[in-house]
Image (spheres, rainbow, N blue to C red):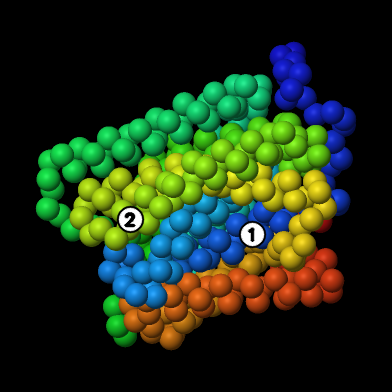
Amino acid sequence: MTAPLPPDAAPPELPERGPVKTRAPLPDVLRGVALLGILLVNAQDFAGFREWTQTGADRAAQVLTDVLANGRFISIFAMLFGWGASGLLQRQGLGVFVRRHLVLLAVGSLHFVLVWHGDIISLYAVLAFALLATARLTVRGLLTLAAVLGAWWLGLGLLEGFAAQAQGLEASRFTGLPALFSGESYAQVVAERGAGFLGDLIGGSLYNGAWLLALFCLGAVAGRTGLLLRPHEHVRLLRGLAVWGLLVGLPLGALLAWLNTRGDYASGLIAIPVRMGGGLASALGYVGVIGLLTVRDRLGPLRAFAAGGRVAMSNYMAQSLIMTAVFYPYAGAQFGQWGAASAVGLALAVGLLQLPISAWWLRRFGTGPLEWLVRRVVYWR
């Protein structure tokens, strides 16, 4: 006999088996906005420029990216992933949960090896299994766990950065950029990524695991409380998130922009917790603002992002294909040739163009191609 779930963890009614058939607008809009914001930040990795070397218009583009986007939208995306994964476990049970995340692990692994080293799907899929240990936690328990994990991860990052600063290390700042060389063939790049995939996945899980699990827990809280599906019941909370999230997040974004003008090793280390801590604060602020607009039926042009959010996985893969086709040596060979302004401009154009294409595709087919494939494998129909 199993122990009963706590009251705030129990679903209000018997869940329907199979894929969700009706959709609330707020999660899709948030996912679509997050997808565009992530692409703007990832433009630096695709194009191969160093943040601290930018000048003029490129410096202005980098500052805007750091203040408004860097760490912000990846936090929204991670919380939405936790929201979806925890909801799937409650609605569909362990079997579907395991199958879906194994399928996502396979999709993400192929994306990493065949297309781009910055894949997050495989990492999220692996860490999603840690959510199984939180299934019986109350909302308060989830919030406590998120706070402890988040504070621990941020604190360790700050301590490491300040220790490097105190020691006066003269090492130059690390880039995190892929090692690409002029004239490399596609087969050579794939072979290098394939050789490093497992190590990167394990290392990423160990390094980022605590922080990402904290964000997943916050997403699970949003699911338990109905924040995203019933935002009209949480106006006061949304208002608080909007005000306090932006009051904390925007100054930290400005601090990140300043750190990203410096090429020393310590500044690079300190920038990591500043990026993610300020990113979470601003992410909650953005959720609050968009949630309030949803409640007041004033989303306006933001409604266009819902289509992109509904086919987020397909759009994410398409972004990688387009950007690597422009910059990687086996195709457009522009890696290291563009500054922030032109690279972010291209990313913005690609992301916005995907919105009408996504709307057209949904009208014609009802779901994205990768979304269709994953559902077919997970639900066996």
Dividing the picture into quarters, in which one does residue 153 lie?
Answer: top left
Q: Nearer the viewer, residue 322 or 168?
A: 168
Q: Residue at x 71, y 56 (%)?
A: 29
Q: Give the class, few, some or many, for how many residues have Cα within 10 Å of label 1's Cα (few <14, many ≥20).
A: many
Helix, strand or loop under label 2: helix
Q: Find residue 378 and name its label.
A: none
Dividing the picture into quarters, in which one does residue 171 lie?
Answer: bottom left
Residue 115 in percent (x, y) is at 49, 70
Residue 199 in the figure: left or right of residue 381: left
> Of the residues under marks 2 and 1, which one precedes in the sequence?
1
Mark nearest the camera among 2 and 1 is 2
Helix, strand or loop under label 1: helix
The residue indicated by pointer 1 is: 33
Residue 222 in the figure: left or right of residue 259: right
Q: Quadrant of the C terminus?
A: bottom right
Q: At label 1, which amino acid type do we have?
A: Val
Q: Give the class, few, some or many, for how many residues have Cα within 10 Å of label 2's Cα (few <14, many ≥20).
A: some
Q: Is residue 309 above or below residue 154?
A: below
Q: Residue at x 77, y 40 (%)?
A: 231
Q: Quadrant of the N terminus?
A: top right
Total number of numbered labels? 2
Q: Residue at x 44, y 79 (%)?
A: 342
Residue 321 in percent (x, y) is at 53, 75
Q: Find residue 258 and name its label.
A: 2
Q: Residue at x 35, y 33 (%)?
A: 155
Can residue 257 be seen here? yes
Q: Is residue 253 above or below residue 341?
A: above
Residue 184 in percent (x, y) is at 33, 81
Residue 114 in percent (x, y) is at 48, 69
